[in-house]
Structures are given as structure tokens and as C-alpha cells.
Image: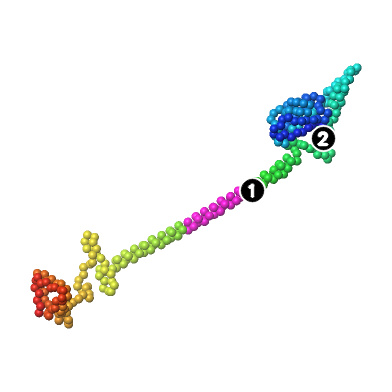
Amino acid sequence: MALSRVTRLGDGTTTTFTVEFALGFLREDDVTCRVGSEPTDRAITFLTPTQFQIAGAAPGNNVPVVFSRTVSKTALENDFQDAETLTEEALDRSHKQALMATHEALDNRVAAPAQDTDFNNFKGVNAADPTADQDVTNKRYVDDVAGGGFATQAEAARDAAEGFRDEAEGFKNQAETARDAANTARTGAETAETNAGNSATAAAGSATAAANSAASVPSIGTGVGDAVGLEDVGGGTAGLPAVDGSQLLNLPAAGGPSLGTDAIIRTNGKTISEDITIPADTNGMSAGPITIAPGSTVTVLGDWTIV
């Protein structure tokens, strides 16, 4: 149990606290209030000997509000003189000063040490979180920073590194895919170029063959299936070449139908089964008898001789 120090916890709304030091306090100036890790003391309004109201905003939830009582170690509360009348109150205050100074020692509230402190296998307790480089720290703070804190940061860094690695792997795969696509496109272009060259060569060969074929085709062939080449008959118009009778084969004999060698007997049919008109400037001759089939008509405007 602390004798010269009382700690209360804030709740976010309260600024008035009940504070009961052992033996109370001698002077209001002996009492101070420190809230959390604030660097300076809060001002106190003493409502009653045990009800203290602190200045400023209400401390937050679970924020420690520490009230300390500190008596003078260099000035006597009562400096008695010879033959002075002693009163109970004066004697009590003098004794309280001594006891309150002892309370501070029992509460481990000592002046700044001039040498290293040996805790003799005891713990320092209720240490606040450090704020300056040379502040003493507590276990929780060390665990949060050196233990869980650094470990968490290391894990986060590891996760980030793995994320970057995966992203780099993705970029590598994309680059390989693009490279393969480029190789495929190059191969396709080379194939197209080769095909184009082959097509050009084939076209040139076809053109050469066509030219050679055109040059070798005679005007009129002499064998079965021979081609006939067209000639320019004037004004860029193509036409058949001139021919003579010796080149006309398999024509019917001259003079119409006949029988026998040299068409010794001329022949004609016996029945006319169509409409025939002999123009006025035309002569006709038939070997009779001739029969005009029903429904057929022979109109004679010129001359028709039947022998």
C-alpha cells in the first residue's frame, strides 16, 4: 500500500478524485498531480481534505492519475524555541513531517541517485512508457517493440517482399509470352516472305510458259486438238487468221445431197412437211413426184420446176 502516493484511473469524464494519503497532508503545496505521461503537473483545487479537482481535460479511460505528497527535507515544519509553549498541533505536525518523509522512502520515492541502483533481486514496478532516448522502459513496451513490434514489422516486410517477388514473376511470364509471340510473328513473316517468293517465282514461270506457248502456237494446227491463235485483224480487234480450202476438212460435198461417185445422182426428198416460200427472184427445181403434207404450204413467187 502506498503511503505518500495515491493513483487513480481516468474514465474520460471525471476530473474530481478522492485522495486519502496516510496521515493526510500538511500543506496544499506539498501535493502534486501528474496525469499519464504528461511532462508537467496539473493544478489542483482542494474541495475538501480528500476531494481534489484537477485542471484541464478529463483523463482518458485507464489513464493513471497520480497524486503525490512530498514534505520538505530541509526545513522544519515547526522550529521550537527555548521556553516556548508546546501545543499538541505543533508537536503533531512536527512528528507528521518526519513520518511523511519516512513514507516517501518506504514508497521508494528517493532523490535522483548519484550511483548505480542495486535492486537486490527486486523488480522496479509501475514504470511508464519511455518518451526520451534515455528513459527507463518497462517490459510491455519492450515486448511490443522488440518482440511483437519488430517481429510484426519483419513479417510485414517479408510479406511485401513475397508480393514483389510474385509481381516480378508475373512480369517475367508476361515478357516470356511476348517474346514467344514475337518469335511466332517473325516465323510467320518469314514463311509469308518465302511463300510470296515462291508465288512470284511460280507466276514468273507461268508467265514464261504462257509466252512460250503463245509463241509456239501456229495460226492453224495440223493435228487433232491443235490450237488456233487469234490475230489482230485491225484496230486492235482479234480474229481468226485467213485460211484456204485445203485446211477445211470434213465438209459436206458441194452441190447438196447426192449418191455415187462424184455425186452422180442428185437426191431430194418426196414430201414437203413445212411452209416454204420461193422468192420472186429465185428459181427452184425438184425431182418428182412431190407430196405436200397436210398443213404445209409452198408459196411460189418465183419459179419452181418439178421434173
116 vs 40, left or right, is right
Considering only vertical position in the picture, is 55 above or below 296? above
State the image coordinates of residue 251 (x, y, percent, origin top left).
21, 75
Q: Amino acid under label 1? A: Asp
Depth check, front residue: 118 or 207: 118
Picture quadrant of residue 121: top right
> Which corner quadrant of the image does residue 58 belong to?
top right
Residue at image position (31%, 64%) is: 211
- Farthest residue to the top: give it: 83
Task: Specify the farthest residue to the right.
Answer: 83
**Residue at screen point 10% across, 72% down:** 300
Q: Secondary structure at mark 2?
A: loop
The amino acid type of the residue labelled 2 equals Met
The magenta span reads 159-187
Query: Is 93 left or right of 33, judged from the image as shown?
Result: right
Quarter of the image where the N terminus is located: top right
- 272 or 307: nearer the viewer: 272
Query: Which residue lies at the image location 15% right of the left edge and 76% below the top edge?
Result: 293
Q: For mark 1, what is the residue?
A: 159
Magenta includes 49? no
Residue on which disc 2 sits:
1
Circle nearer the N terminus (2, 1): 2
Residues packed near mark 2 inside 10 Å, few (<14), some (14 to 19) or many (20 plus):
few
Q: Is residue 297 above or below residue 90?
A: below
Q: Position of residue 3 (x, y in %)?
A: 82, 32
